[in-house]
Image: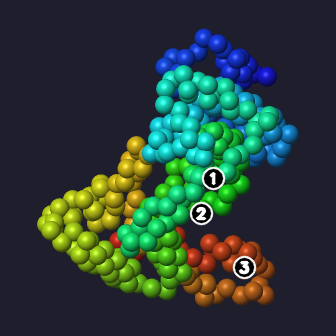
């Protein structure tokens, strides 16, 4: 057991710690360190070590404290479950930390309630108890590293650091990039410029409708200067107190690749051209000129 892990386990039995004396920066740092070790063990395929580290994490004082902090600082902190219990005071929260134990734990029934919808109908909502919420938050800390390693790289729902804006940007850019890569060998640079212009016009029309009371200068400053590049559509989104930049690619920047014509004198039955034809058959890049942007292509041709 490492000194870090030993310290976390010893802290769980400390009688002197109070809610206000908890060092939250250290708590997050130590929990993150264990999560990183879990992720590395998953990558290495060491399932025994993964289980051991998850046990250490779910039994550590810092992880339990963060789980309690999460359920007592979100919007549902004033909504009790079927037991009617809320953790309001610092003393209640410290007792809650001590109560988060796997041995003897059994989830309680959900409290059913109904909230009004915009259309006048009622939407059912099931509310777990504070203990159940905290246990879910605690075990999420141990399961999240495994989920991140094993998840599809293009999956964006319910993942840390990813949002709906990531999914939209990825889908939009994938369409543009896929089309450009497919046609880059046969179309002219003018076609790429026309597509970029079409995307610009559609985005501009959409934003004019959405911000009908804003000036053209405001739209340009907000959506076409965020990336610091001229003519690139981009937005800055605040997600979990962090600023993230999303931008739409310009397919002119992908570049055009032209087919490299075979040598006129090449003969597959002459030994001096044997290596030349082998390279053309087995090396895909041998049949293509190097990647050129639309500007570079114009300069090369004209």
> First in sequence: mark 1 or mark 3?
1
For marks 3 and 2, give the CA distance. 33 Å
> First in sequence: mark 3 or mark 2?
2
Mark 2 is surrounded, within 10 Å at the Cα level, by few (under 14), some (14 to 19) or many (20 or more) other residues, namely few
Residue under numbered circle 3: 281
- As rendered, which of 275 and 138 lies closer to the eye? 138
Relative to 283, is 15 above or below?
above
Residue 114: x %, y % from top left: 49, 61
Relative to 162, is 141 above or below?
above
Q: Is residue 87 left or right of residue 132?
A: left
The circle drawn on residue 78 is none
Q: Is residue 100 left or right of residue 191?
A: right
Residue under numbered circle 1: 110
Residue 175: x %, y % from top left: 49, 76
Q: Nearer the viewer, mark 3 or mark 2?
A: 2
Question: In what element is the residue under mark 3?
Answer: helix
Residue 130: x %, y % from top left: 59, 40
Mark 3 is surrounded, within 10 Å at the Cα level, by few (under 14), some (14 to 19) or many (20 or more) other residues, namely few
For marks 2 and 1, give the CA distance. 33 Å
Rendered residue at 47%/37% (across/down): 73
- As rendered, which of 178 and 184 lies closer to the eye? 178
Q: Is residue 230 visible?
A: no
Question: In what element is the residue under mark 2?
Answer: loop
Rendered residue at 46%/75% (across/down): 176
Question: In what element is the residue under mark 1?
Answer: loop
Residue 201: x %, y % from top left: 28, 78
Q: Nearer the viewer, mark 1 or mark 3?
A: 1
Residue situated furthest top in the rendering = 16
- As rendered, which of 104 and 247 lies closer to the eye? 104
Q: Is residue 268 visible?
A: yes
């Amino acid at each position: 057991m490492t000194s870090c892990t030993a310290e976390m386990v010893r802290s769980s039995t400390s009688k002197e710690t109070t809610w206000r004396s908890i060092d939250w920066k250290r708590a997050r740092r130590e929990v993150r360190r264990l999560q990183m070790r879990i992720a590395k063990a998953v990558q290495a395929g060491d399932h025994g070590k993964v289980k051991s580290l998850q046990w250490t994490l779910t039994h550590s004082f810092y992880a339990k404290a963060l789980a309690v902090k999460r359920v007592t600082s979100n919007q549902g902190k004033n909504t009790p479950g079927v037991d009617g219990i809320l953790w309001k005071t610092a003393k209640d929260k410290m007792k809650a930390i001590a109560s988060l134990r796997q041995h003897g734990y059994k989830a309680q029934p959900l409290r059913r309630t109904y909230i009004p919808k915009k259309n006048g109908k009622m939407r059912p909502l099931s509310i777990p108890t504070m203990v159940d919420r905290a246990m879910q938050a605690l075990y999420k800390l141990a399961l999240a590293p495994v989920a991140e390693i094993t998840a599809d790289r293009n999956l964006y729902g319910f993942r840390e650091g990813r949002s709906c804006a990531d999914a939209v940007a990825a889908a939009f850019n994938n369409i543009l990039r896929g089309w450009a890569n497919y046609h880059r060998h046969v179309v002219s640079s003018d076609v790429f410029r026309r597509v970029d212009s079409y995307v610009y016009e559609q985005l501009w029309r959409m934003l004019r409708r959405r911000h009908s009371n804003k000036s053209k200068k405001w739209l340009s400053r907000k959506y076409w200067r965020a990336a610091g590049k001229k003519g690139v559509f981009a937005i800055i989104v605040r997600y979990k107190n962090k600023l993230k930049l999303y931008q739409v690619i310009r397919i002119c920047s992908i570049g055009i690749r032209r087919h490299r014509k075979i040598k006129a004198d090449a003969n597959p039955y002459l030994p001096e051209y044997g290596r030349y034809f082998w390279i053309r058959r087995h090396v895909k890049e041998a049949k293509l000129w190097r990647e050129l942007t639309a500007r570079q292509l114009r300069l090369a041709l004209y």
